[in-house]
Image: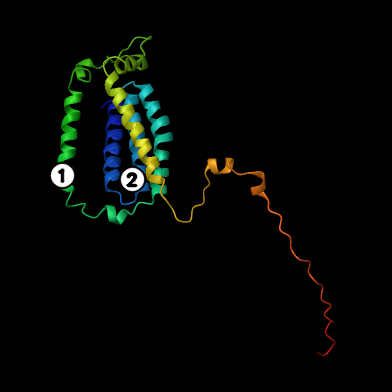
């Protein structure tokens, strides 16, 4: 068995186990950390497939930025985990059905026109070959519309995450910019005339009192 084959089985096994822990972990922070582990191992698999650009982008963008945002949003929302896990087993058949459909769709995609084994680049690539150039050519020509749709979906997700965090609180204090601009100079300071105080000479207590 070649060394690349051994690395493939190691990365694949850890990826599958980490993915299972993402959906079975009770703590959302632990689930996000297991997702980071899965991303690292998928990056290793892409490195074995000589897709260095995708591997580095997965680590720098998803692990370095997106997962940090996931953790930030999870901690900020203060989700009630026990309430969310109620009815888990009753919804398990529907979830298994949806998961099976996703696996079938991925199998159809991987065996399709562009992602089949016959369409993979040869192992002995020329010196001037660039997988980044090939990825960009497919992404902005044959998959231009799916790319734009994915961008819109991500934008909607960002807006939804921001709106979920904007909760109205009773103890918050805020001031509108229009109210600040409308304030006049005489409203900023008020002179109050007070009567002078009368000093009272109170004798000091004597010793023994």
Q: What residue do we see at 28% from left, 52% from top?
A: 84
Q: Vertically, is 58 above or below 76?
A: above
Q: Which residue is nearer to you in this view: 96 or 161?
A: 161
- Residue 3, located in which quarter of the rendered image? top left
Q: What residue do we see at 58% from left, 42% from top?
A: 182
The secondary structure type at the circle numbered 2 is: helix
Q: Vertically, is 93 above or below 119?
A: below
Q: Which residue is nearer to you in this view: 158 or 49?
A: 158
The secondary structure type at the circle numbered 1 is: helix
Q: Is residue 113 visible?
A: yes
The answer to whether 77 appears left or right of 172 in the picture is left
User: Where residue 108 appears, x then y in whole percent?
Assistant: 16, 26
Q: Which quadrant is home to the C terminus?
A: bottom right
Indicate the colouring scheme.
rainbow
User: Where residue 86 appears, x then y in whole percent?
Assistant: 24, 55
Q: Vertically, is 140 above or below 41?
A: above
- Residue 208, located in which quarter of the rendered image? bottom right
User: Where residue 41 appears, x then y in whole percent?
Assistant: 33, 34
Q: Residues within 10 Å of mark 2 (few under 14, many from 20)?
A: many
In this rendering, the label closer to the viewer, 1 or 2: 1
Q: Mark 2 or mark 1, which is nearer the start of the sequence?
A: 2
Pointer 2 residue: 31
């Amino acid at each position: 068995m070649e060394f690349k084959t051994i690395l493939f089985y190691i990365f694949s096994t850890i990826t599958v186990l980490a993915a299972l822990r993402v959906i079975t972990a009770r703590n959302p922070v632990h689930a996000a950390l297991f997702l980071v582990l899965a991303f690292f191992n998928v990056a290793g698999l892409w490195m074995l497939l000589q897709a260095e650009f995708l591997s580095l982008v997965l680590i720098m963008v998803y692990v370095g930025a997106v997962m940090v945002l996931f953790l930030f949003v999870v901690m900020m929302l203060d989700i009630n985990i026990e309430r969310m896990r109620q009815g888990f087993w009753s919804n398990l058949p529907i979830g298994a059905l949806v998961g099976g459909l996703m696996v079938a769709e991925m199998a159809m995609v991987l065996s399709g026109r562009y992602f089949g084994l016959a369409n993979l680049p040869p192992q002995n690539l020329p010196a001037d070959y660039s997988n980044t150039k090939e990825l960009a050519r497919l992404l902005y020509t044959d998959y231009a519309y799916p790319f734009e749709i994915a961008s819109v979906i991500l934008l909607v997700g960002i807006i939804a995450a921001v709106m979920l965090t904007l909760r109205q609180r009773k103890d918050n204090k805020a001031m509108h910019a229009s109210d600040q601009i409308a304030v006049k100079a005489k409203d900023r300071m008020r002179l109050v005339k007070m009567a002078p105080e009368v000093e009272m000479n109170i004798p000091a207590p004597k010793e023994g009192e």
